[in-house]
Image (cartoon, rainbow, N blue to C red):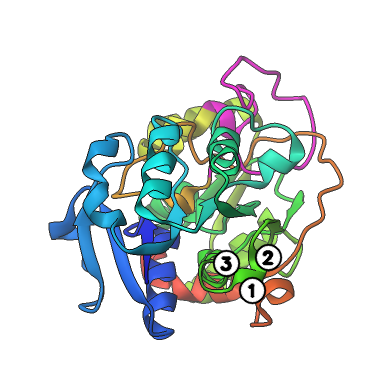
Amino acid sequence: MAVLVAGATGNVGRHVVGRLVEAGQDVRALTRRPGAAALPPEVRVFEGDLTRPETLPPALEGVRTMLLFPVGEAVDEVVALAAKAGVRRIVVLSSAAVTAGYDTEYHYPVEQAVERSGLEWTHVRPGEFAVNSLYLWAPSVKAERRVVDVDLDTPGTPIHEADIADVAAAALMDDRHAGKAYNIAGPEALTHRDQIAAIAAAIGEPLRVEEVEPEEAREFYRAQGGWAAENADFLFGFEDYSGETADPTGATSGVDRQDGGQLQDGERPAGGEAQEQTWEEPDIPWLTCTDITGGPARTYAEWARDHVDDFR
């Protein structure tokens, strides 16, 4: 029986596909642009769109387990088609914001649709994605060896997208993960200052660091454009998880509304991937990749070395 990976061309999805291929699985990939997928030759690539369930039946035929990218639109229809095709378990690439109680509109409805279906399920709920710092800092690092940010000494536990993929792949292949919701984080607490230092060490050049107020940071990243501009209000506390106006002086360490590492086919998913926003953090039972798979959990320094070309 086959394994289907939705979001197979995203940062996490590509790693999941690679793990499954290495394990000798029959892997299928779902993407809206199969011609640009550039996946291993063993992988059967299907054109499909989670917002258009009628495109999915060919990809679902003969599938036993499925990684579901978090798209809420038409999710009930998608899950019903999976069940009809004989899919046994769905692994949801979700967010620790569900555990925290902040996410009721993005990942949570996808999780609930899967649970309502009666199929086996596993929810993979990452916290802070290390790759978010790539989308935020890389443009100014590449252009002028400069990083602008707020609260440089606030700690976080960013996780390598490959660690998330290891957990997701294990959940797809091993029945022992059925019925589990895993809140996963990186193996070490690091401030933004620590993370910037790791990037500087990886590229072998010093970086100029500027700590600014939220208003100045928001304007800087709005001017930068791209992902950072789209998420600037949320990143720096001017918008809450639901998109309502918020007070940037409001709180402390936070969890993911939607992770930058899940970009599918290069677009920004509904809800954004912002990570800098802060809340009072509840007592989340964090695990690392090691706790779940037994494999090594990758450090942020490793992540920075893996992405050194993106910062140069």
226 or 140, which lies in front?
Answer: 226
- Residue segment shown in magenta: 233-258
Relative side of 15 to 249, left or right: left
- Cα–Cα span, label 3 and label 1: 22 Å
* Residue lying at 72% horizontally and 35% vertically, measured from the top left: 278
User: How far across and how far down the image is residue 274, in percent?
Assistant: 54, 39
SS assignment for the magenta stretch, majority:
loop
In the rendered image, residue 69, in percent from the top left (x then y), is placed at 44, 48
- Taking the magenta stretch, the answer to whether it contains residue 79 is no
Q: Amino acid type of disc 2?
A: Gly
Query: Which one is in front in this view, the residue at disc 2 or the one at disc 1?
Result: 2
Q: Few, some or many C-alpha atoms within 10 Å of disc 2 (few <14, some 14-19, many ≥20)? A: many
- What residue sits 27% from the left and 35% below the top? 52
Sequence-wise, the earlier of marks 2 and 1 is 2
Q: Residues within 10 Å of mark 1 (few under 14, many from 20)?
A: some
Q: Position of residue 81 (x, y in %)?
A: 36, 43
Q: Residue furthest left?
A: 35
Element class at badge 2: loop
Q: Is residue 113 above or below residue 86?
A: above
Which quadrant of the view contains residue 308?
Answer: bottom left
Q: As drawn, is 177 to the left or to the right of 117? A: right
Residue type pointed to by label 3: Ala
Q: Earlier in the sequence, mark 3 or mark 1?
A: 3
Circles 2 and 1: CB distance less than 8 Å?
yes
Name the residue beneath numbered marker 2: 186
The front one of 186 and 310 is: 186
- Residue 263 makes an appearance in the image: no
Which mark is drawn over residue 171?
Answer: 3
Q: Which mark is residue 299?
A: 1
Q: Residue at x 52, y 47 (%)?
A: 259
